[in-house]
Image (tube, grey):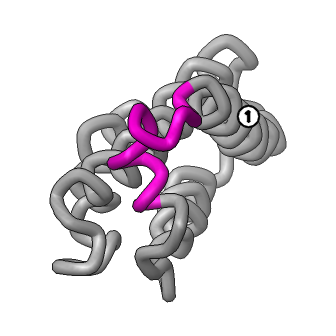
Amino acid sequence: MRSLSAGADVRAALTDIADGFAPDTLALGIVNAEAMGIEDELVREASLRRARIAGAVTHRLERDQVEPLRADVIGAALGGAVLAAVHAWAYEGAGRAPLQPTLERALAIVTETLP
C-alpha cells in the first residue's frame, strides 16, 4: 500500500536543496563554460547529479510500493527539473535572486506525476 507521504517527502527533500544555496563557482562555470573550456566536464557532472537525484527519488517511491517504471520516470523527471532550475538560476544571474523560486517552478512542472 502506498504511503500518502511519499510525494510530500520527495517534494520537501528536493525543495530543501535550495536552502542556503549560494552563487559560487558552479554558477560561474555554468554561465562561462565555453570560455572556461569546461563544457564536457559540466555535462558529465550534471549527468551524475541528475542520476543521483533520480535514484534517490526512485528509491523513496519504490519504498512505498510505487510501480518501478513509474518511480524511475518520476525520478528522472525530477532530477532533470532540479538541474534545469540550477542552470536557469545561473543564467538569470545567480546572485540576483535565491534559487528557491526557480526550483519550485521547475518542480511544479513535474510534481503532478507524483503519487
Say if the magenta span includes residue 29: yes
Magenta span dominant secondary structure: helix
Q: Residue 74 at x, y = what percent?
A: 53, 28
Given residues 57 and 17, the one toward you in this image is 17
Q: Secondary structure at mark 1?
A: helix
25 within the magenta span:
no
Residue 43 spot, x, y in % from top left: 58, 27
Quadrant position of the N terminus in the picture = top right
Residue at image coords 20%, 79% = 97
* Magenta residues (range): 27-39
Q: Residue furthest bottom?
A: 20
The residue closer to the viewer here, 49 or 4, is 49
User: What residue is shown at x 33% (from left), y 59% (from top)?
Assistant: 103
Q: Is residue 22 above or below residue 101?
A: below
Q: Nearer the viewer, residue 47 or 27?
A: 27
Please provide percent x and percent y for residue 36: 49, 42
Q: How many marks do you count on the picture?
A: 1
Residue 94 shows in the view:
yes
Question: Which kind of residue does numbered mark 1 sit on?
Answer: Leu
Crowd class of label 1 (few under 14; some 14 to 19; many from 20; radius 10 Å)? few
Instruction: Say if 6 sits above or below 95 in the image.
Output: above
The residue sitting at 52% across, 52% down in the picture is: 7
* Residue bearing the label numbered 1: 48
Please indicate whether residue 25 sits to the left or right of residue 95 in the image. right
**Relative to 37, 49 lies left or right:** right
Q: Residue at x 40, y 53 (%)?
A: 86
Q: Is residue 61 visible?
A: no
Residue 94 vs residue 75: left or right?
Answer: left
Residue 49 position in % (x across, y down): 68, 42
Asked if residue 103 is positioned above or below residue 60 in the image, the reply reads: below
